[in-house]
Amino acid sequence: MEGLTIPGSNDIIDAYSRIEGSVNRTPVLASTQLNSIFGCDIRFKCENFQKVGAFKFRGATNALAMLSAEELSRGVVTHSSGNHAAALSLAAGNRGSKAYIVMPDNSPAVKKAAVAGYGAEISFCKPTLAAREEAAQRIIDNTGATFIHPYDNFNVICGQGTAALELYEEHKDLDIVLCPVGGGGLLSGTATYIKGVNPSISVFAAEPAGADDAFRSFKSGEFISTHIPNTIADGLLTTLSERTFKIISEKVDDIFTADDATIVECMRLIWERMKIIVEPSSAVTLAVIKLNPGIFRAKKVGVILSGGNVDLGSLPF
């Protein structure tokens, strides 16, 4: 693993200059009805409209932009069952590079199809971290491909932070910025940028109660690297890394959790009231607002909706 290099807000500004022409500038939407229900002014940064349907394309695109021509010729590799796999596959294809993706053999068929559709070479493995890492290492040994971690990567974190940059450019008067946390790449990039440009804005994170390792790490001050997650928010199952834990510990104001029932309720509310598709990992943010009315009442809140990749054949409502 590369050393624990920690980005600053200028690194995120630099990343945006590299990827601006390649990523979607996603819309910031508001709902009068939701504002009335929750008693605050919410601005939703809709990364469900990003390419591959999630913010992950920002980090993957920036990581590819930082590789040399020789590195691009050897390809890139990662292990992921979700949005990072699709994002890296598309970003690699855009640069004429090969993506090797290690996916657990129990990954949803819709995600396998999406990754294959972006032209990646998929290797399947048993659904354990050890199996994923071993399979990725074999590919690196055989091809010389560069490993791009889903979140424990300086350039990925800088790319993810560009969603907050766009949000802030449009709404500089925010009181709070709220985003989900799984591995912490999006949260690290968001907190780094927002605290760099306006330290008076509070940066909060939302996490499923059934996968609350970041919450426990943040509250205890000690990095918790193992847990057994149980949540409908399948994009938020991973633990923090030492790098993302360090950034979050220094720059995030608080982390809140939400139970799955409230996540599903708020996911449905967004679908019904805003007419947009978001996945459970996005809806955890609104669930946290619902469960903590005193924190958010009468505030102007920027919410990053992280993605919209949901299996329409098995909706929770």
Image (cartoon, rainbow, N blue to C red):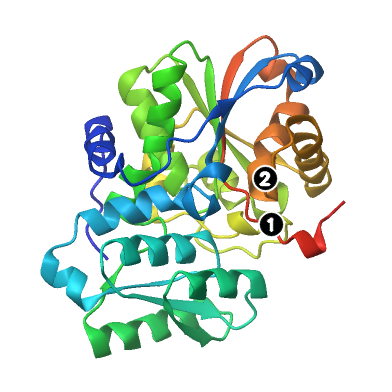
| Residue 90 falls left or right of residue 111 | left
The answer to whether residue 223 of the structure is visible from this angle is: no
The answer to whether residue 317 of the structure is visible from this angle is: yes
Q: Amino acid at mark 2?
A: Val
Give the secondary structure at mark 2. Answer: loop
- Residue at image x 36%, y 51%? 59
User: Counting residues from the N terminus, which is met first, the one under dot 2 or under dot 1?
Assistant: 2
166 versus 17 height, above or below:
above
Q: How many numbered discs, if any?
A: 2
Q: Which residue matches tag 2?
A: 278
Q: Quadrant location of the N terminus?
A: bottom left
Q: Which residue matches tag 1?
A: 310
Residues at badges 2 and 1 in contact (C-beta under 8 Å)? yes
Q: How would you rate the neighbour count of disc 2 (Cα within 10 Å): few for under 14, some for 14-19, many for 20 or more?
A: many
- Residue at image x 22%, y 54%? 65
316 vs 239, nearest the viewer: 316
| Residue 23 falls left or right of residue 27 | left
172 versus 86 height, above or below:
above
- Tell me which corner region of the image, top left, top right, bottom left or bottom right, holds residue 31: top right
Q: Position of residue 267 (x, y in %)?
A: 76, 42
Q: Position of residue 160 (x, y in %)?
A: 39, 44
Q: How would you rate the neighbour count of disc 1 (Cα within 10 Å): few for under 14, some for 14-19, many for 20 or more?
A: some
70 vs 256, nearest the viewer: 70
Give the secondary structure at mark 1. Answer: loop
- Using the image, tell me which numbered label, if any, was put on residue 220: none
Q: Position of residue 141 (x, y in %)?
A: 25, 87
Inter-mark Cα distance, 2 to 1: 7 Å
Q: Amino acid at mark 1?
A: Val
Q: Position of residue 190 (x, y in %)?
A: 42, 35
7 vs 227, nearest the viewer: 7
311 versus 7 height, above or below:
below
